[in-house]
Amino acid sequence: MPTMADVARSAGVSVATVSHVLNDTRPVLPRTRRAVLDAVEELGYTPNTLARSLVTSRTRSIGLAVSAISNPYFTEILQGVEASALEHGYGLLIADPHDDPAHERKVVQLLHERRVDGMIVAPSAEPRDLVGYLARHRVPAVFLDRVVGAPQDTDALPFDQVCAESAGPTALLVGHLAGLGHRRIGLVAGRPGLSTTSERITGYRHGLAAAGLPFDERLLVHGDSEAAGGERAAAELLSLAVPPTALVTANNAMTIGALRALRARDLSVPGDLALCCFDDFAWADLFAPRLTAVAQPSRDIGAQAVQLLLERLAAPDRPARAVRLPCTYVHRTSCGCPEQTVKAHERTLP
C-alpha cells in the first residue's frame, strides 16, 4: 500500500507539502498541488483518516440529525449538506431523531461519541435536553429549519441557525386566497412547539388581518407535520357546520393528507375547495390541478448550514449567527386561478 512518503517522492516535494495539500492546512502553489494530486491518483494513495484524526483531533466528519429523511424537503436539505460537506473534504454520519426529544438526545450523543467534528441538527419541539447536551460538551453545532431562541437577538442564540422565512410567505398565500374572494380560509398547521409552526400561524393571522378578515380559531387545526395528521385536520375542517372554502397547508406531508381527506369526500380542488401549500415538491406540478405553493430553498439551507459549521470550527468563540433565506412563490392552479394567468409565474419572496 503506497504511503505519503511515496506520494512525496513521486511528486518531488516534501512529506509536509503532501500533508498540506491533502489536509488543506496551508496554501500551496497550484502546480505543486496538481503534482501532488496527480501522484495520489497514479499511486492509488488513500489517506489514513484514523491516524490523521489521532494527530489532529479532527475526524473530518459532520453529524447530521434530521427527522423524516423520507420527506422530500429534508431529502433535499440532506443533498445540500452532503454536496457542501464533500466539497470541503468532510464525510457525513446521519441519524433520524424521529422528532422525539428523548430519541433526539440519544442520537446526538451517539454522533458525538463517534467523534464528529460538529453537528447539524433540525431540533424537535422540545429541544431543552439537546441544547443542554451540546452546550455542556461544547459541541460545535448548527440548527437548521427550526430555530431555538430568539433569532432577532443573536446574543440569546445558543448556536448558529439557518432556516427559511415562514411568516411572510404564509401571509402571502392567505392574502392571495382572500384576493380571490375567499372569506373562510383554513390552516392545517404543523406540530405544536416547532418554530416553523408558530411562525406560519403568525403569518396566517397576519394575512387574515391584512385582508380585513377575522381570526376564527375553529379554522386552525394542527396536523402535526405528518400526512396522517394532515388528513385528520382537513377532515375536521371539512366537518364544520360552515367549512372553509379555501385551505392553506403548512408543509408538503400535510398537503398529501389534506388531498386524501378531500378525495374521501369526493371534493375537488379548486372547484369545491381552493388549496395553497407551504413546501413545493417535485411532483406538485403533476397534480391536477397543479399546486400553488411556497418553495423553500432546501438545498441552500443545507449548504449554508455546512458553511456556518465550518466557520464555527475555524473560530469557536465568534458570536452566533441566525441566517434567514428567502422562499419562492410558485403560482399554479390549485388556488383557483385559470391556467393562462399562472404560466411561468414564479418569484422570490422578500
Image (tube, rainbow, N blue to C red):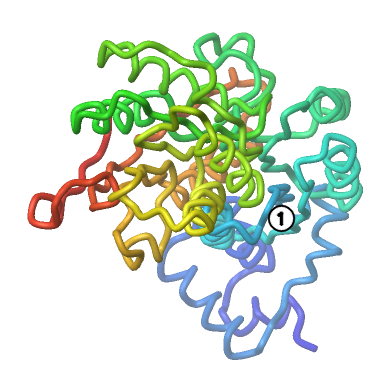
Nearer the observer, 6 or 184: 184
Disc 1 is placed on an element classified as loop
Above or below — where is 23 with respect to 36? above
| Image point (27%, 29%), residue name | 182
| Image point (36%, 42%), residue name | 276
For label 1, count other residues whose C-alpha is less than 10 Å away and answer few (under 14), some (14-19) or many (20+): many
Above or below — where is 29 with respect to 57? below
Nearer the observer, 298 or 186: 186
Q: Is residue 108 left or right of residue 241?
A: right
Please state the horizontal and vertical placement of residue 19, each as a whole percent of the image.
Answer: 67, 63
| Numbered disc total | 1
Above or below — where is 269 with respect to 313? below
Q: Quadrant of the N terminus?
A: bottom right
Q: Is residue 102 left or right of residue 227?
A: right
Which quadrant holds residue 11? bottom right
Nearer the observer, 264 or 228: 264
| Image point (37%, 46%), residue name | 295
| Image point (41%, 23%), residue name | 204
Please state the horizontal and vertical placement of residue 181, each as a whole percent of the image.
Answer: 20, 29
Which quadrant holds residue 274? top left
Kindly identify the amino acid type of the residue bearing the numbered disc 1: Arg
Please state the horizontal and vertical placement of residue 180, each as a whole percent of the image.
Answer: 19, 33
Please state the horizontal and vertical placement of residue 317, each as a whole percent of the image.
Answer: 66, 21
Outermost residue toward the front in this view: 241
Question: What residue is disc 1 on?
Answer: 60
Which quadrant holds residue 245? top left
Above or below — where is 176 with respect to 93? above
